Image: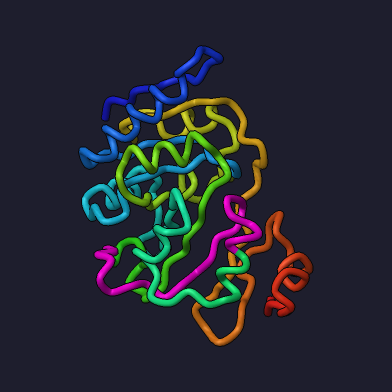
Amino acid sequence: MKTRIIAINQEKGSEEAAARAAGEVLKSGGIAAFPTDTVYGLGAVYSDRNAIRKIFEAKGRPENKPLSILVADRGQVDLLAEEVSEAAKTLMEQFWPGALTLIFRKKASAGIPEEVTAGGDTIGVRMPDCDLTVRIIEQAKAPLAAPSANLSGKRSAACGQDVIEDLFGRVDLIIDSGECPVGVSSTVIDMSGQRMRILREGTVTADMIEEITGIRPDQ
């Protein structure tokens, strides 16, 4: 596969041009790697089954591992999730955009391919705190299924050069903007059951969640 690389520079309009280029790739069924506020992501339009399969092939990712979905605003959660609890709304208000992934029961009408959920009935959703990522989602006209942009089994890529080393020739587009500001994967909280449960703790901690919601999450 031919891979285009776009390096973000300080020129005015550089990020916007990169976002438009990524949007065109994604809308046409391609896959693109791009920076977020945590680590680099490898994205495809969430409802495009063929593009989702390209992600698994590019990463060498096992098919039994679900993909998270990135949204540009909180309103897109209603497109994807069956039910959003008051606790989830509080967490989104406090920590979105940011390094927090919330797991909901998927909405049947959302057209989410089983490849995204690994055949399950839940989805992980996050709104990244990165203007470029949000613009890419907006240009794609849809939320993006986007795991980390690295070969399966390797450490998540926090800089563009790592992405190029792993995925050049495997993806349609790589946007290189240097290092991500956080460099650590997001906290993941399962909101689909009766109680909140932390599946992975990152920069948003259990203590922070309890302080905001008044509920101590299971771990």
Q: Position of residue 41 (x, y in %)?
A: 47, 43
Q: Position of residue 214 (x, y in %)?
A: 74, 78
Tell how many labels: 0
Front residue of this view, candidates 132 and 86: 86
Q: Position of residue 180 (x, y in %)?
A: 61, 35
Is 100 covered by the magenta stretch?
yes
Question: Residue at 58% across / 44% down in the picture?
Answer: 129
Front residue of this view, candidates 205 and 1: 205
Residue 52 lies left or right of residue 76; in this view the side is left
Question: Residue at 36% across / 67% down in the picture?
Answer: 118
Quadrant of image for the C terminus: bottom right
Question: Residue at 43% across / 77% down in the picture?
Answer: 83
Quadrant of image for the N terminus: top left
The residue segment tinted magenta is: 92-113
Is 33 covered by the magenta stretch?
no
Position of 9 relative to 130 (above/below)? above
Position of 34 relative to 61 (above/below)? above
